[in-house]
Image (cartoon, coloured by chain):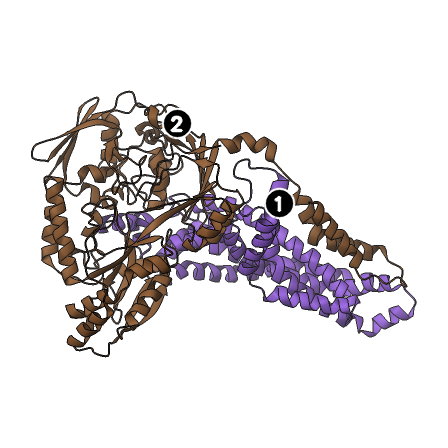
Amino acid sequence: MARFILMRLLQMIPVLLGVSFVVFISVYLVPGDVARTLLGYQASETAVQALREEMGLNRPMLVQYWIWLSDLLRLDLGFSGALRMPVAEVLGGKIVNSLVLMGFSLFLVVAIGFVLSTYAATRFRKLGDRLTVFATLVMASVPTFWLGILLLYVFSIQLQLFPISGMYDMYDPGGFWQLLHHATLPAVATAASAIAIVTRVSRSAMIDVNSRTYMRAIRSRGITPARVNYVHMVRNALPAFVNISGLQVGYLFGSAIFSEIIFNWPGIGLQLYNAILQRDAPMIQGCSLVIALTFVISNFLADLIVRMLDAGKR
Amino acid sequence: MKQTQKTSNDLKGDMPMRPDKPLGWTRRLFSASALSLALGSSVGLATLSHDTQAASARDNTVAIAIEANMARLDPHASTTWNTFRVLMHIFEGFVAEDLTIKDVEQPPIVPALAESWKISEDGLTYTFNLRKGVKFHDGTAFNAEAVKFNMDRMLDKDFKYYQAVAAGLMRWMWQDLDSYKVIDEHTFEIKLKSPNSEFLRRLAMGGSGTPRFISPASIEKGGNDSVETNPIGTGPFKFEKRTVGEATTLLANKDYWDAERLPEIERLIFRPISEVATRELALMSGEVDMISSPSPDSIDRLKAQGLKIESSPVSTLYMMWVNMKEKPLQDVRVRQAICMALDREGMAKFHRNGYAQPAYSVLNFGGPGYDPGFRDCQYDPEKAKALLAEAGYPDGFKTRMDWTMGGGGDVNTVGDAEWIQRNLSKIGIEASIESFDNGTYWDMLGSGIREGTGFMSVSWGETSFFWLDQVIASDAIPPNGFNAGYYDNPKIDELLAQARSAKNEDAMVEHLHEIQQTIADDMAFIPYYTPIAIYAMRPNVSGFVLAPQHWHDYTGLKKN
């Protein structure tokens, strides 16, 4: 096990290096002058040059990359051009906010995905199953931003059950319940398509398990259907479930970007969106890096859990 | 709440359960958790309320949702008008525009930290008598030394706290500066190289840096970068905190020097919400008290909800840059034909739902020399067709329009392009549209209109005319400025210089009118409308004054 973990960690190094390089140069592939954009259109060339100097933009690209990477290893992501504040400082709070939203979304994905797939698999080709399949088809096809606006319209405007935006009340911020209240709609919007995918994949896995001969053998021993379903079927389909759920984490981050913009949730996604609008290179790099890291780490964790489940089975 | 509870019970009743089979605990657990997740969470959470504790905080706080995120908070280095919209409440300069009155074309200049001033006969020396007894928010006294500290910070390369980008950002402000000095504790003198008819007006401006005063003590203590997180000025509101991307909170300055403009409320929250639909929803639900720039299409709906709408034309101009290098457009008759083809009145009335005024001159509404009666051309598609034929294009020609998807305050700029496209097609000009994100777009404008494109367009304009230096002057042809259509007429440069150094306003306006006529004759720029700024607010918000400026005075704002 330790060897497996070590190998996977070592494998992550070239992946992360590649990611960091792509993240770094992506900003330079975009046409236009970062310093000019930051200063606006009334600034003189001298001011632009002064800022280029301040930001180190006059050095060769590979030198810039090397400096950026070595700073990165010290957790120094540089200064935001638009805010003149350390990127790491700004992102620190944003990461937490995004993780809160992600955590809640992932909880919904795992819980609802598990319940729905088990429900559908045990009613294979019956009405409940067909309804579930239909529902997941809808959920998977609906774009996050559209669903977000729909949820806002129905639950916030018409029914007035949920707030429109942000994480806390503007006038009197604080408290776990207030947070949960604000997080519900964005989490549902973020989770919808992932729930659909998890449900469909693990439903298939469970149906597949059900058709195996050993399941027939178990049934023939007169074990109650509930036990057959919820112990044997579920347990054997668990690795597939965990694997697909783990893979969703990265995609959840993708959907979360839309949710964060629609619901004005102050996380990495909204920060990235604003940084792109402001052409704030260090901030764009910081945000992309955090998102890429989340993807890599969550895949690693999913692999690890699947491996542990496999080991448990042996 | 009760209704939702009932729904969840109903659903439970509908759950398919087979009575012939024993219902295992796991199954029950699953059914229960499915329901509680799908519906229960909403039921439980929605009942939460915080009305009681928040009531008092709510009464004294006004939250405003604005279109875009703010940039850095250092007033000498800050770049966007959206940021100045917040900074102007914290920092003050010698003079200000009086934004407590509306229904004026251009806000009058009033004293701020200078009680009075004297301008020498030759228009070169400005002597400011500084207001006595004013303190910065950190208790530091405001005096001539503090002014010098700030001037050095903006302009003196050798000063310990020199802000490297300030001078370049504020070329529009200090281009005519000769020298400055402290006369005594409450007197400060600025000398210019050549007279500047707009010097006082420009002292009141901001957006690309602003010549306003920061507490010297705060910088000496925390260093230059500390201004970004701890901006200390003398204004009616002081900075409380900023959570990047979420909100910036200002507190009323109870010791403000101007008793007439003591803030009525205790806290002012600026909250960036870039999505226009989300901004509107946040207002409807009462999460914020006021929003800027709702979509003109939403106004009726907002009104029907009982929300208050304030609107006023603002000193901005939407204008097309014409590419003078493109073959058909080199002929002035073709450019005139294009002008005549534009139904600008219809555009303002129908496309912008009445929330715009047609514009016919490069001198924008709210700016110096604005002349509402001026017309660069008359709408006349028939005559336009004839002119095109005369120029050798009886069947029109093909061209392209490069357009922006809009910045902070813009709503549906691409709709503008489509309107213009339809107008042009009526005289046989077939124009395709390509749109770009705002950042890229400005880079394109700064490097000049590309080959094959006939027109580009942005909104620009101030209550001062300094922006024309960067747009219509021949030394502003890219890469040196934003004369993106390569309009090269030395007469314009001369007129601009004359307008700036004019000794009095009448002379300045006379030169500006000459500029307006020259541009119309050459038809190098085709303005189309002045937007009407719209603010929407909750019915319990009062005292908002929508002066014709991009930013507003919030000292009279009340909430009942």
Dot label at residue B1: none
Q: Is residue A68 visible?
A: no
Q: How many marks?
A: 2
Q: Colour of chain A?
A: purple
The crowd level at tag 2 (other Cα within 10 Å; few <14, some 14-19, many 20+) is many
Q: Position of residue B217 (x, y in %)?
A: 32, 27
Q: Amino acid at mark 1?
A: His
* B134, above or below B560, in the image: above
Chain letter of the brown region: B
Q: In the rendered image, which quarter is residue A243 located in? A: bottom right
Q: Position of residue B559 (x, y in %)?
A: 47, 33
Q: Amino acid at mark 2?
A: Asn
Residue B246 in the figure: left or right of residue A1: left
Q: Which residue is mark 1?
A: A181
Q: Are marks 1 and 2 on the same chain?
A: no
Identify the secondary structure beneath mark 1. helix
Q: In the rendered image, which quarter is residue B56 located in? A: top right
Q: Position of residue B263 (x, y in %)?
A: 39, 29
- The alpha-carbon separation of the residues under discs 1 and 2 comes to 34 Å
Q: Chain of mark 1?
A: A
Residues B67 and A20: in front is B67
Q: Quadrant of the N terminus of chain A?
A: bottom right
Identify the secondary structure beneath mark 2. loop
Dot label at residue B253: 2
Q: Chain of mark 2?
A: B
Q: In the rendered image, which quarter is residue B447 located in? A: bottom left
Q: Is residue A311 visible?
A: yes
Residues A229 and A73: in front is A229
> Which residue shows up at 19% across the image and 54% down it?
B374
* B297, above or below B510, in the image: below
